[in-house]
Image (tube, helix red, strand yellow):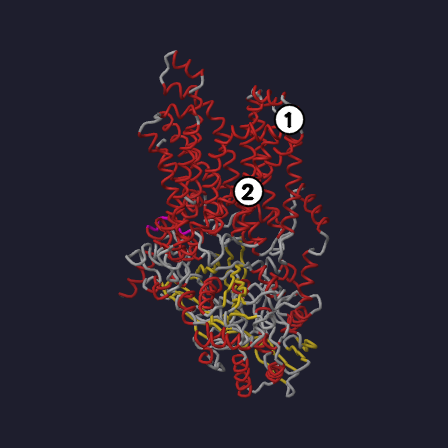
């Protein structure tokens, strides 16, 4: 009786508070920093698109869960041939697209072929490069043939760039996405919000929430104000870590601190003198105080890393000790390399605050050992042009957010230009290996190699910071991929 | 008058043409490729090339300039690179936020400034005048984005009278829209009100020294009556000019304020477009703002010339 | 000397002296980070407190004064250096196509929304003090051109100018030897006003990250850094804000005071 009365009181209080535009229990307003440029996850790199649509509106053959595991998605089950070249996927058979048409093997064939086509504008085309053929055996069976075994293939299919789309609705996808997910796209007010509604014809476990509104607030102060003023119910990817203690102390809110796949590194141009000298790179590693950077730039949120790998991953090897903070050693190494008086170099910093703030701190730390750094703040477009494509830089700070991307070190053309044949061989081995234990061992070797070569300054793993009202349950704490999966989110009573 | 109008109209067309040339070619020099920005760091060169072709970035600059200007005459500003929607539509949507904001700020500014200026002129030299003038000195010196920060801190975070920002959306009704634009409008209006008050005051003081005013006072009218009956009307001309100019300034000047209050207006659009190297959006919005100013100036010139024949003699 | 001028001089002097002094001495090294000591409120060691990296705010304000003043000063210099000759030329050739061209060009530049263009220039061609100076300076040129032309035109009608022309002096010499000294007062006042506007413009550009780059301190950037911390450490936003307000106000008051002081009519009235 008491329980009933208090619920009744709560309900009436909430209805009286009716200025709140939404009913409290089945609607949610989630804010994030960046607005998607359009709504097709398969033709742009903007993570914001996945943040809104991944698993909510669109699904792939496999899918990421909040703990980073890859589980079955639209594919009910699969069978891999002994030589690792042929994957046979059995699809769920009661799946409908949001426009009512059925999802079947032909749609899978269409999606995969579209992604790997010559004129495809898929930002992660490399994921599909090994596919030689996609066939629909029957309405619920798809056979994918690879040109070489790929231990990452199922993992790759879970990426937002591999979601399944329909040829009937592909033309309007950028403005009116039609997927198979637990939510349907309802409305987009550009510059302001995107609205989704629950898909009652969903093939799997239906979502609890009925109406979802995504709002886009890039300014950190505005983000803080919007949460404090209770304009939004949750902010995923909260951009101002300095404000989190205030939210933690406030019983109205909960703070979720998780990890991402973002290795934040001080990228070093390995082909530009003096960084082509491994002693100089080693000096760089010892001149950096990681904890000071995490404290100063991220207000304590973030895990120091010693190599390019996510610490939450079971195969992680802790190598922070081999690049410990030791300015005296750094100076000694510089002198040995012939730079007793230090040298000058450039530091290009893209917009995120981990780069801008982290950069200022690193500049000060490097100055202590005689390395004079000239900071250049750049927009992403300029960064891509000058640093990434032009390779015209000394140092830069960026967070590589793709999961399991240690393979970038095997590409000598990649912007930091690390060219080590031993590592390249290691990666080829790894890609061909499917046995989990063997993979773990190889991944360990890879991490050790790039650590002892001091290819880049490994700083910290970017934390996923989210703030939400205390009653919100089911939000992902970690970000194994760019997504705001609301399929299992609900309000506590 | 007709000759004058035609001359000014010709001048207007030339100005617009030159402006469009300047805007297009300066912005096109910008380093950075929208296609690689959109596809990110993992994209392969052939994918980027395909996207560039799709966006029409490989067409020579001159051709693109002509297509753009021709389209503008019919209201078609092209397609945004990043959003893939017609620029005119995006701009129209944003105008529904920026225009009300500019008008609201203008109204606030005028409502505060005119009475303050009149009061100050009437009590010239006395405490009232000094108080108002000091206040305007302060108002002019305050950066509007700092003022916005303070307003948010006090009224949104501490007092929770207002939301921290955001736009209510026209579907919620005029009241909600005005409420969400209140803090932004105040931040924009303050420095403008300060300037306007000073202009009002000095325009009135100038007019009060004119002979016809002394005649009016000699006839027996009090200072206040003279002010209202004769002074105000004449003083209003420079004041109205400033108000007109302020409008176009407010439209463009909201760029930073919109960032602070996360309003989906023209200012934020320009910022995002610059970051994403969505050049066609940047060019179109800047062109629109320039157009607004040139047209307002044209209208003001015509109004002046209609009222004061002496001005038509000026080249 | 009137009251505006005196107060204006004092307030402006604070900023200028702080900037000059910063070359010789600041309480702390303005770039020295001390993260454990971050976000202190004003106290006896750090008179204005410390920022989020533990840097001394008083020292940063002093060095920031250098940035604001330098940028505004050079921008005004550009405006005067190019605007005054153009204005004089237009006045000398009043009514001709040169005059028309210069005035139309002026109107054109005025038509461009200055803040948007400044952001555009710095975003495209790179952030930094130099580009900020150019962006702000460009918009100063038409201001001075217009003011000079407006003031010079009536002077050309005066008799002593007629005499000079009869004596054979060409327009350029007349402009420099006779016109310029007579518009100097007006120019000084205008320069003071443009200077104060330049400080505000520099602050706005730095606020959006397009002005002087780290580690060079800048009042505008200090405000940007302070934004997310304003509810926990308000002094971070208040102090640079006050610095800007005091300096701009001082310059404006000085401009007003100078205008009254240099104008013979109002000077007599004020005694």
Distance of mark 2 from mark 1, alpha carbons? Answer: 26 Å
Toward the viewer: B298 or A238? Answer: B298
Magenta span contains residue B227: no
Query: Which of marks 1 and 2 precedes in the sequence?
Result: 2
Residue range (magenta): B159-164
**Chain under callout 2:** C
Q: How many residues crowd around disc 2 within 10 Å: few (fewer than 14), some, or many (20 or more)?
A: many
Toward the viewer: B38 or C264? Answer: C264
Q: Position of residue A476 (x, y in %)?
A: 45, 70
C182 vs A224: above or below: above
Q: Residue at x 57, y 31 (%)?
A: C176
The residue carrying mark 1 is C95
The residue carrying mark 2 is C78
Q: Main secondary structure of the magenta part?
A: loop
Q: Residue at x 62, y 83 (%)?
A: A425
Q: Position of residue A412 (x, y in %)?
A: 63, 75
Q: Is residue A236 visible?
A: no
Q: Position of residue A477 (x, y in %)?
A: 43, 70
Q: Quadrant of residue C111?
A: top right
Q: Residue furthest top?
A: B219
């Amino acid at each position: 009786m008491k329980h009933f009365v208090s619920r009744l009181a709560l309900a009436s209080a909430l209805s009286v508070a009716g200025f709140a535009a939404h009913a409290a229990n089945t609607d949610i307003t989630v804010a994030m920093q960046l607005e998607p440029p359009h709504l097709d996850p398969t033709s742009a790199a903007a993570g914001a698109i996945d943040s809104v649509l991944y698993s909510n509106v669109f699904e792939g053959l496999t899918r990421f869960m909040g703990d980073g595991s890859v589980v079955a998605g639209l594919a009910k089950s699969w069978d891999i041939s002994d030589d690792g070249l042929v994957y046979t996927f059995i699809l769920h058979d009661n799946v409908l697209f949001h426009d009512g048409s059925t999802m079947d093997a032909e749609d899978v064939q269409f999606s995969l072929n579209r992604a790997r086509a010559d004129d495809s504008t898929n930002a992660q085309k490399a994921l599909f490069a090994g596919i030689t053929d996609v066939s629909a055996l029957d309405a619920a069976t798809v056979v994918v043939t690879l040109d070489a075994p790929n231990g990452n293939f199922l993992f790759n299919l879970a990426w937002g760039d591999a979601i399944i789309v329909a040829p009937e609705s592909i033309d309007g996808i950028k403005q009116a996405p039609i997927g198979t997910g637990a939510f349907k796209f309802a409305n987009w007010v550009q510059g302001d919000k995107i609205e989704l509604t629950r898909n009652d014809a969903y093939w799997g476990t239906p979502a609890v929430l009925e109406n979802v509104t995504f709002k886009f607030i890039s300014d950190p102060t505005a983000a803080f104000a919007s949460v404090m003023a209770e304009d939004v119910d949750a902010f995923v990817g909260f951009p101002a870590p300095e404000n989190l203690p205030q939210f933690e102390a406030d019983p109205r809110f909960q703070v979720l601190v998780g990890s991402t796949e973002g290795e934040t590194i001080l990228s070093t141009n390995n082909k530009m003198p003096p960084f082509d000298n491994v002693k100089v790179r080693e000096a760089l590693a010892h001149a950096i105080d990681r904890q000071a950077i995490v404290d100063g730039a991220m207000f304590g949120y973030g895990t120091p890393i010693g190599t390019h790998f996510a610490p939450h991953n079971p195969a992680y090897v802790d190598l922070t000790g081999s690049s410990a903070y030791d300015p005296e050693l750094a100076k000694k190494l510089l002198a040995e390399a012939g730079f007793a008086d230090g040298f000058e170099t450039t530091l290009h910093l893209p917009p995120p605050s981990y780069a801008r703030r982290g950069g200022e701190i690193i500049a000060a730390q490097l100055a202590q050992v005689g390395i004079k750094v000239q900071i250049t703040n750049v927009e992403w477009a300029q960064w891509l042009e000058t640093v990434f494509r032009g390779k015209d830089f000394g140092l830069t700070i960026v967070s590589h957010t793709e999961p399991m991307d240690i393979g970038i070190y095997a590409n000598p053309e990649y912007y930091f230009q690390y060219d080590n044949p031993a590592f390249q061989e290691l990666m080829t081995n790894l890609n061909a290996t499917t046995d989990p234990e063997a993979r773990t061992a190889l991944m360990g070797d890879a991490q050790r190699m790039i650590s002892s070569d001091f290819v880049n300054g490994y700083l910290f793993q970017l934390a996923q910071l989210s703030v939400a009202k205390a009653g919100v349950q089911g939000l992902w704490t970690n970000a194994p991929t760019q997504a705001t999966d609301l399929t299992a989110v609900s309000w506590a009573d | 008058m007709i000759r004058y109008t035609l001359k000014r109209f010709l001048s207007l067309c030339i100005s617009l043409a030159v402006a469009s040339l300047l805007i297009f070619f300066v912005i096109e020099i910008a380093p950075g490729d929208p296609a690689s920005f959109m596809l990110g760091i993992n994209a392969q060169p052939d994918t980027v090339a395909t996207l560039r072709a799709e966006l029409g970035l490989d067409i020579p600059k001159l051709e693109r300039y002509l297509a753009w200007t021709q389209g503008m005459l019919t209201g078609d500003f092209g397609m945004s690179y990043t959003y893939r929607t017609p620029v005119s539509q995006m701009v129209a949507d944003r105008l529904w936020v920026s225009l009300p904001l500019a008008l609201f700020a203008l109204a606030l500014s005028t409502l505060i400034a005119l009475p303050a200026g009149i009061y100050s002129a009437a009590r010239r030299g006395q405490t009232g005048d000094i108080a108002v003038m000091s206040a305007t000195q302060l108002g002019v010196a305050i950066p509007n984005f700092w003022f916005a920060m303070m307003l948010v801190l006090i009224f949104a975070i501490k007092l929770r009278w207002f939301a921290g920002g955001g736009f209510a959306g026209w579907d919620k009704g005029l009241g909600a829209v005005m409420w969400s634009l209140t803090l932004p409008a105040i931040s924009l209006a303050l420095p403008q009100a300060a300037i306007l008050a000073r202009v009002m005051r000095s325009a009135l003081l100038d007019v009060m020294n004119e002979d016809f005013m002394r005649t009016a006072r000699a006839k027996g009218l009090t200072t206040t009556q003279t002010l209202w009956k004769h002074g105000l009307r004449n003083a209003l001309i420079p004041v109205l000019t400033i108000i007109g100019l302020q409008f176009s300034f407010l439209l463009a000047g909201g760029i930073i304020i919109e960032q602070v209050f996360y309003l989906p207006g023209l200012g934020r659009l320009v910022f995002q477009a610059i970051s994403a190297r969505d050049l066609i959006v940047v060019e179109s919005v800047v062109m629109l703002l320039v157009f607004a100013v040139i047209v307002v100036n044209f209208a003001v010139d015509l109004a002046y010339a209609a009222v004061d024949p002496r001005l038509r003699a000026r080249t | 000397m009137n009251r505006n001028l005196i107060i204006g001089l004092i307030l402006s002097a604070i900023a200028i002296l702080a900037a000059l002094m910063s070359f010789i001495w600041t309480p702390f090294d303005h770039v020295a980070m001390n993260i454990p000591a971050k976000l202190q409120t004003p106290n006896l060691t750090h008179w204005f407190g410390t920022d989020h990296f533990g840097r001394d705010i008083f020292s940063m304000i002093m060095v920031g004064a250098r940035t604001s003043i330098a940028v505004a000063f050079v921008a005004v210099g550009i405006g005067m250096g190019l605007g005054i000759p153009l204005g004089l030329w237009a006045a000398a050739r009043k009514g001709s196509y040169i005059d028309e061209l210069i005035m139309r060009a002026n109107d054109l530049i005025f038509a461009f929304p200055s803040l948007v263009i400044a952001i555009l220039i710095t975003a495209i061609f790179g952030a930094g003090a130099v580009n900020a100076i150019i962006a702000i300076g460009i918009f100063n040129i038409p201001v001075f051109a217009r003011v000079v032309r407006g003031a010079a035109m009536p002077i050309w009608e005066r008799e002593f100018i007629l005499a000079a022309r009869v004596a054979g002096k060409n327009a350029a010499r007349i402009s420099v030897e006779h016109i310029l000294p007579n518009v100097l007062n007006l120019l000084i006042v205008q320069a003071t006003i443009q200077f104060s506007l330049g400080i505000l413009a520099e602050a706005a550009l730095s606020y959006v990250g397009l002005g002087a780059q780290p580690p060079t301190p800048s009042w505008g950037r200090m405000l940007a850094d302070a934004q997310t911390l304003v509810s926990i450490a308000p002094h971070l936003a208040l102090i640079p804000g006050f610095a800007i307000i005091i300096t701009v106000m001082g310059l404006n008051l000085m401009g007003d005071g100078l205008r009254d002081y240099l104008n013979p009519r109002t000077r007599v009235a004020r005694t």
